[in-house]
Image (tube, helix red, strand yellow):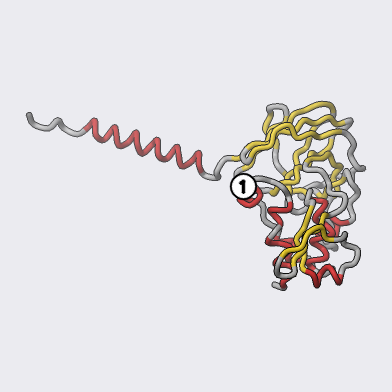
Amino acid sequence: MDIERRAVMASMGGWLGIESARLYLTPSPAFIAAEARPPAELLLSLAPRFNVVAALVPDDLLARLPQLPAASAAFSGGIRLIRLPDPWPRAFLAGAAAPRSEEQPLEQVGKLSHGQALVEGWTGPPEPPAEGAATVSEYRPQRVRVEVEAPREAFLVLNDAVSAGWTAKVSGRPAPILTANTMVRAVRVPAGKSTVEFRYRVPGLRAGLIVCALSAALLIAALALLPPRPG
């Protein structure tokens, strides 16, 4: 893996300003598979769409990409900090676009208009960009709440990584989490006002607790069946 791709990918969690990013937010394999453009250039051009606001970039890459903004700070080892332009929000409403097999997914993400999202599994016709409001009212490592007001049915896109253990509810009702833009979460929301809540539980934790409880119950039952010890 070349030096600039290492620098770009290694700092991704820090870019996002998410407290829990270093724990579970990692680049999608699609980042590595993209071949249409040099990987570092592709990463930097797409990063603002994932709510990335800044990047650590090597000097030689800055020299090759004059369209990047001027660096705001320099570090040892020839690394500079740049602020990326026009980052998309942490949460926003989007109309669905279906992935096209003839084109790299991240190349498709790069062509989306604001208010659109590439939604895996979407089989309906392409939807126009969505309007409305999506406001993050609570953000914790294991719980995120978003207040939504949509003029029509749309997807709520949350620019946090898809990960096992997350579930979602829309106004108290369970809702499936779909993958949007190759790596982040999306939930279908109805027209009007709704509240979307994402919760995280360690995968397998509930099953493990049930097994422990059953084991304890069997142990207690077995002890109860033992004959009493002589006086």
The percent position of residue 178, horizontal first and vertical second, equals 73, 45
Q: Nearer the viewer, residue 129 or 173?
A: 129
> In the rendered view of the protein, which quadrant contains the N terminus?
bottom right
Is residue 189 positioned above or below 64 on the image?
A: above
On screen, residue 21 versus residue 208, left or right, reads right
Q: Which three-letter amino acid code belongs to the residue tagged 1?
A: Ala
Read off the residue under disc 1: 164
Question: Residue 106, percent across and down?
Answer: 81, 59
Residue drawn at 69 percent across, 46 percent down: 18
The correct choice, above or below, for 99 with respect to 198 in the image is below
Query: Height in image: 106 above or below 61?
Result: above
Foreground: 124 or 2? 2
Mark 1 nearby-residue class (10 Å; few <14, some 14–19, many ≥20):
few
Q: Nearer the viewer, residue 214 or 137?
A: 137
Quarter-wise, where is residue 129 in the image? top right
Res. 191 image quadrant: top right
Could you tell me if residue 36 is visible in this image?
no
Direction from residue 168 to residue 182 in the image, left or right: right
Where's residue 136, x and y in %?
75, 35
